[in-house]
Amino acid sequence: MLVIDNVTKSYGSVAALQGVSLELKAGEFFGLLGPNGAGKSTLMALIAGLRRPDSGDIRLDGQALTPDNLRSRNKLGFVPQTIALYEDLTAEENLRIFGRLYGLRGALLQERIDQALVTAHLQDRRRHYVKTFSGGMQRRLNIVAALLHRPKLLLCDEPTVGVDPQSRNAIFEFLQTLNSEGLAVIYSTHYMEEAAKLCSRIAIIDHGRLLAIGTLPQLMTRLPFRESLRIEGANLSRDSLAPLLSFGELTSDADAHVLTLHASTHLSDVFREAESAQLPTSSFQLTRPDLEDLFLHLTGKSLRDS
């Protein structure tokens, strides 16, 4: 569906994207995960045809996505990081403007507006000014405005920035519903939990380079780390945990013991042995590597501190 081939983009001496290549399948929910300044927004702008790459190609259904190719660009919708709405107009007036820009007119435009307001759960606020809306309401309106022309691909650039947790969850459910109906989505974020929750495949990007691409399980195989059990209990000594030593390496600190499991260890065997030794399994806490660990492994720094 979408093919990005060896794309580069620089701003003066700053390389925003360096040899980026990836492919997106029809109906996929694809995540771009990286810190602020990683190149996510630049890549989104290039896909949207708002800017030209310095080199490389971007094609949608075999057609180039460039600023002057309006026919191909009409197959996608773009939700920018900064809310793109007219605050002094109503929700309906905003949708009418965007619909007309997409070439919609008359009864079809009104039908699409009505459907969009229902989809965004804003039908009761259609004649209210956008400046009176919460951040989450504005984000939902911004998303449906990008869908009026029924695109095949939706680009969402950090769509939950500045949104409260309840509104974030509403946006997640909204996008997941659209994706289940066949809409392909590219979703950029610097929140690991968002990428893990929403995306069927994830690309990790930093300093303009794609460091890894795959499903979450595929990405986690890049990590050399193993599962571990954190065991808390003031009355537990290293000697009392001796029955578990065959399952991994035990380290201890002032607060707890940590059993780093061998790769071949099955958790059921560990808990069976712990119960036989009358150890308090309720105090066992399983720790698995996550996307933060992967980003740290690939870049040598924390995603949250990048």
Image (spheres, rainbow, N blue to C red):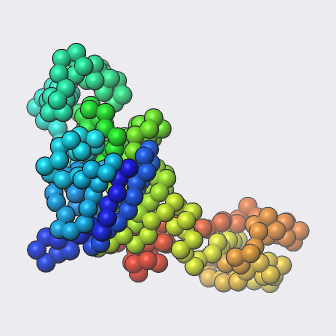
Above or below, comparing residue 139 to residue 11 in the picture: above
Residue 276, picture quadrant: bottom right
Q: Residue furthest right?
A: 276
x, y percentage for residue 149? 26, 32
x, y percentage for residue 95? 20, 29
Left or right: where 288 falls relative to 25: right
x, y percentage for residue 171? 38, 40
Residue 89, picture quadrant: top left
In the image shown, does 89 or 19 lie closer to the viewer? 19
Q: Residue furthest top?
A: 107
Q: Residue at x 24, y 53 (%)?
A: 64
Residue 274 visible: yes
Residue 139 visible: no
Above or below, comparing residue 97 to residue 265 in the picture: above
Q: How many marks?
A: 0
In the image shown, does 127 or 154 lie closer to the viewer? 154
Q: Residue at x 70, y 76 (%)?
A: 263
Left or right: where 262 falls relative to 216: right
In the image shown, does 165 or 257 lie closer to the viewer? 165
Left or right: where 203 falls relative to 146: right
Q: Residue at x 21, y 41 (%)?
A: 71
Q: Quadrant of the C terminus?
A: bottom left
Q: Residue at x 48, y 66 (%)?
A: 291
x, y percentage for residue 293? 49, 72
In the image shown, does 192 or 254 lie closer to the viewer? 192
Above or below, comparing residue 103 to residue 217 in the picture: above
